[in-house]
């Protein structure tokens, strides 16, 4: 299920209000539970719930499609009335999109096999090892830019098997995603080491996306932080991952 | 065991041993041994005596007792100095204090996005930031910043290093608000200076050819006219040296947030767009913003600013013209980081806007820009000035990355982060850190015997920092009331001009209009704390006819080129 190349569509119909450019906004996301995943024939997850609430509050029509991350980014660069989420916002990507940020605050950590003997106190300590990540992830680019040897595959989940089979030495992954995947796999042979990077994850929209809609979305997102909506959603998903 | 252990480890060879060393902790040792290990192996250069160093490190160990076991998180931009902190100093600090520090490194723009997010949402993303003092105008107007002065007087009092010696910091004025409060603690500083190949400039054949073509000596350019002539000379006339294509200019032009720094850092002041007066020009600063009684009143000429003045438009025009005519073709597709090391590859004759943060990357003995003894074939010198520049004006930019604390961070985490901040700037550590990153913060380090001996290896860096000229190289000042929201306007508009979507004139007009709109938004949003109070729009001639900035267009924007021999050029640092 997790590795299937799958495009699913979830559409919200808000029939009574106007919206950006008079069209339905296409929102692309990736299979990355618990942020976003397909349950039955619906797309669900923490970031999906946040973005749905955000668009509902902003009275914008939308549909959500699931694509591999790299393709989701590329498609959003080309399609006028589209956005991708939850994308890691960084300086290299800044000029490519209009940003509504942050829809999520996330962290990335290094994971190793227990008893591997690998000790990681700082980023420098992973030099000389092969670090696994996945295509489209800002993590892989960040590590590679520091001269760290990375192994990049299309999806993140198989990195668990890559680590167990010692095809990589270290797995670099989002902490919430990794904790979820390890729990799903009932894996107790992998342990978290250094949580080395914090990321602002955002809704990244095509540069032709109407600025007024970006403004409205940004204002409503800020309000969702102020009124506790974001925290409630995060608490809900974090407790479901940990328990 | 300590020294013996190190010897035993070094007596082995191979990959695993290296890995072991890199992550090895001396925390398990008794504290005196752990301290001695770090003093023996890392902090070997210091302006303190060994006894004073031990005393200082023991102080860190003692006061950290109630915070031991904590793990804190800080963030900074991506330069050598901060990598040294993140990879080495965090380990030393943890071994001595028992406090783990995760020191994240990221792009400068990302640092600004993150501190803005924490300020806006109140979420404790980080326990401290190394944030450029360019944000001082934002910070002193904000309720979200825990000023260092307040921290030291309140919950940081018992955690303030007795030997911190604030008077020793050369950049404290840049982190102090108009109210006299110190908001940030300097961690590293670097300037943008002129860089050139001293060996090429010294060649008799090039000197003769240049003089015969341009009528004056090939030497350190004092004005933009000479810089332009030298750029043309190497790119169009010398063309090749030892079979390698060479260029008379290097810069960067990629659509990227760092393109904005290239301008907001100092380019307009180097052209001479602002007013006289340090640190930033008064009443019009290097952003072209006019200020009255500490309140910004406009950026466009029609409101008394200079952002779309003839001098500002000239500055952008020349930047694009030189990028197109004299720089390597790839330069326009590069950002700040990508372009930084290009001149070190040996094909660039000079660079007008060169950050000294790259010095450490330019003294590698394997590079074509160093000689057989590993000494630089290049020099840094005072930046040439544009035709609108007048004596008494800001001459360039100085980056001052400084420790910044937010009120949304829990008190115990602020205390732990305050200890780490002081550790990485302490006199035990600071000279060694300066040697690694060449971004000095302490007068005592600059004046040290070590630096006197090492100065010839650094191509003029120490001479610059020992001169009073460094006071004319300044960060963005207090006139910019919201750096995060205003700084992005620079790169968005400059990029339009570089790509040809707009002319230089249109880009600066648009930038000035957007900057005024932003000032207006801030005027409407904020309490009365030096907040913007926009002037009414007047005919531009009203302002251009008054003395000072904005200045009317010069009839001749390219006077005769002026150059000086290197030694005399350095003496100008003292004069100005």
Image (cartoon, rainbow, N blue to C red):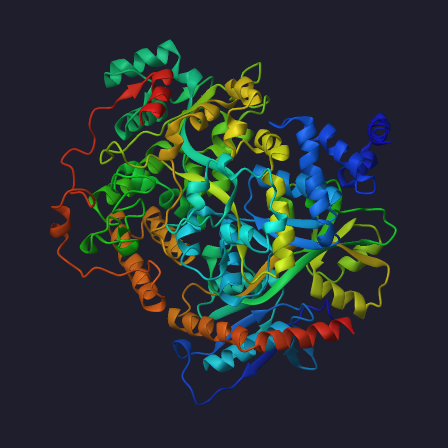
- Estimate the x, y position of residue B327 in percent, counting from the top left: 39, 33
Count of marks placed on residues: 0
Query: Quick check: B459 left or right of B90?
Result: left
Nearer-the-camera pick, B534 or B20: B534
Residue B298 position by quadrant: bottom left
Nearer-the-camera pick, B516 or A77: B516
Can residue B104 be seen in the rendering of this structure? no
Residue drawn where x is 34% and y is 37% of the image: B324
Picture quarter with the C terminus of chain B: top left
Can residue A54 be seen in the rendering of this structure? yes
In the image, is residue B203 above or below residue B40? Answer: above
Residue A147 position by quadrant: top right
Residue A177 position by quadrant: bottom right
- Estimate the x, y position of residue A237 in percent, counting from the top left: 69, 74
Nearer-the-camera pick, A210 or B376: B376
In the image, is residue B268 above or below residue A46? Answer: above
- Estimate the x, y position of residue B200 in percent, counting from the top left: 41, 17
Picture quarter with the N terminus of chain B: top right
Query: Quick check: A186 left or right of B174?
Result: right
Residue drawn where x is 36% and y is 66% of the image: B526
Query: Quick check: B373 left or right of B36?
Result: left
In the image, is residue B74 above or below residue B15? Answer: below
- The outermost residue toward the bottom is A16
- Estimate the x, y position of residue B65 in percent, counting from the top left: 73, 50
In the image, is residue B101 above or below residue B392? Answer: below
Query: Quick check: A143 left or right of A80?
Result: right
């Amino acid at each position: 299920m997790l590795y299937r190349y799958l495009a699913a569509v979830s559409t919200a119909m808000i029939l009574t209000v106007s919206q950006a450019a008079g069209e339905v906004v296409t929102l692309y996301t990736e299979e990355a539970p618990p942020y976003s995943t397909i349950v039955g024939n619906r797309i669900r997850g923490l970031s999906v719930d946040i973005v749905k609430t955000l668009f509902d509050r902003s009275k914008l029509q939308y549909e959500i499609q699931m694509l591999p991350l790299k393709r989701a980014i590329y498609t959003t660069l080309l399609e006028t009335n589209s956005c991708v989420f939850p994308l890691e916002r960084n300086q290299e990507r800044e000029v490519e999109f209009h940003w509504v940020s942050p829809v999520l605050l996330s962290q990335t950590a290094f994971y190793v096999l227990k008893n591997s003997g690998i000790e990681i106190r700082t980023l420098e300590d992973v030099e000389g090892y092969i670090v696994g990540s996945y295509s489209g992830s800002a993590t892989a680019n960040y590590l590679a830019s520091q001269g760290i040897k990375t192994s990049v595959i299309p999806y993140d989940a198989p990195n668990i098997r890559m680590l167990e089979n010692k095809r990589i030495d270290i797995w670099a992954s989002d902490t919430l995603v990794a904790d979820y995947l390890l729990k799903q796999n009932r894996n107790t042979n992998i342990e978290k080491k250094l949580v080395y990077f914090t990321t602002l994850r955002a809704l990244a929209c095509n540069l032709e996306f109407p600025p007024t809609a970006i403004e409205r979305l940004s204002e409503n997102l800020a309000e969702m932080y102020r009124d506790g909506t974001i925290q409630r959603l995060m608490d809900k998903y974090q407790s479901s991952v940990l328990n | 065991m300590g020294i013996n252990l190190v010897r035993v480890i070094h007596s082995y060879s191979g990959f695993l041993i290296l890995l072991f060393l890199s992550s090895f902790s001396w925390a398990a040792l008794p504290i005196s041994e752990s301290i001695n290990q770090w003093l023996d192996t890392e902090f070997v250069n210091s302006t303190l005596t060994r006894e004073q160093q031990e005393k200082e490190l023991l102080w860190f160990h003692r006061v950290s007792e109630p915070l031991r076991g904590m793990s804190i998180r800080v963030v900074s931009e991506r330069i050598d100095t901060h990598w040294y902190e993140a990879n080495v100093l965090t380990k030393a600090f943890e071994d001595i204090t028992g406090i783990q520090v995760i020191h994240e490194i990221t792009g400068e723009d990302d640092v600004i996005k993150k501190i803005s997010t924490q300020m806006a949402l109140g979420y404790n993303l980080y326990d401290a930031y190394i944030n450029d003092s360019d944000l001082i105008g934002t910070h002193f107007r904000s309720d979200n910043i825990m000023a260092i002065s307040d921290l030291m007087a309140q919950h940081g009092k018992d955690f303030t290093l007795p030997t911190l010696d604030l008077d020793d910091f050369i950049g404290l004025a840049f982190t102090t608000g108009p109210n006299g409060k110190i908001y940030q603690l300097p961690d590293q500083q670097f300037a943008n200076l002129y860089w050139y190949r001293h060996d090429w400039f010294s060649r008799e054949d090039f000197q003769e050819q240049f003089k015969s073509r341009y009528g004056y000596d090939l030497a350190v350019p004092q004005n933009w006219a000479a810089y332009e002539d030298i750029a043309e000379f190497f790119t169009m006339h010398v063309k090749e040296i030892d079979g390698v294509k060479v260029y008379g200019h290097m810069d960067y032009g990629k659509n990227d947030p760092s393109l904005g720094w290239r301008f907001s850092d100092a380019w307009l002041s180097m052209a001479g767009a602002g007013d006289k007066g340090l640190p930033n020009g008064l009443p019009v600063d290097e952003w072209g913003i006019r200020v009255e009684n500490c309140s910004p009143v406009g950026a466009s000429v029609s409101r008394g600013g200079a952002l779309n003045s003839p001098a500002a438009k000239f500055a952008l025009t020349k930047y694009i013209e030189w990028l197109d005519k004299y720089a390597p073709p790839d330069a326009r597709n590069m950002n700040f980081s990508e372009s930084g090391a290009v001149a070190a590859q040996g094909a660039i004759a000079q660079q007008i806007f060169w950050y000294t943060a790259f010095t450490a990357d330019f003294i590698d003995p394997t590079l074509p820009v160093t000689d057989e003894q590993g000494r630089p074939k290049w020099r840094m010198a005072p930046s040439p000035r544009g035709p609108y520049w007048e004596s008494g004006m800001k001459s360039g930019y100085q980056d001052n990355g400084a420790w910044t604390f937010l009120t949304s961070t829990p008190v115990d985490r602020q205390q732990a982060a305050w200890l780490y901040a002081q550790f990485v700037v302490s006199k035990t550590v600071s000279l060694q850190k300066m040697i690694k990153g060449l971004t000095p913060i302490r007068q005592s380090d600059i004046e040290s015997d070590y630096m006197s001996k090492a100065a010839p290896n650094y191509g003029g860096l120490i001479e610059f920092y020992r001169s009073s000229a460094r006071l004319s190289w300044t960060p963005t000042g207090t006139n910019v009331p919201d750096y995060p929201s205003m700084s992005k306007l620079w790169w968005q508009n400059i990029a339009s001009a570089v790509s040809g979507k707009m002319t230089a004139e249109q880009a600066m007009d648009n930038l000035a209009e957007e900057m005024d709109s932003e000032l207006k938004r801030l005027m409407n949003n904020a309490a009365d704390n030096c907040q913007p109070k926009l002037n009414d729009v007047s005919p531009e001639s009203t302002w251009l006819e008054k003395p000072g900035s904005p200045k009317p267009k010069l009839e001749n924007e390219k006077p005769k080129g002026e150059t000086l021999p290197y030694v005399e050029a350095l003496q100008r640092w003292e004069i100005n």
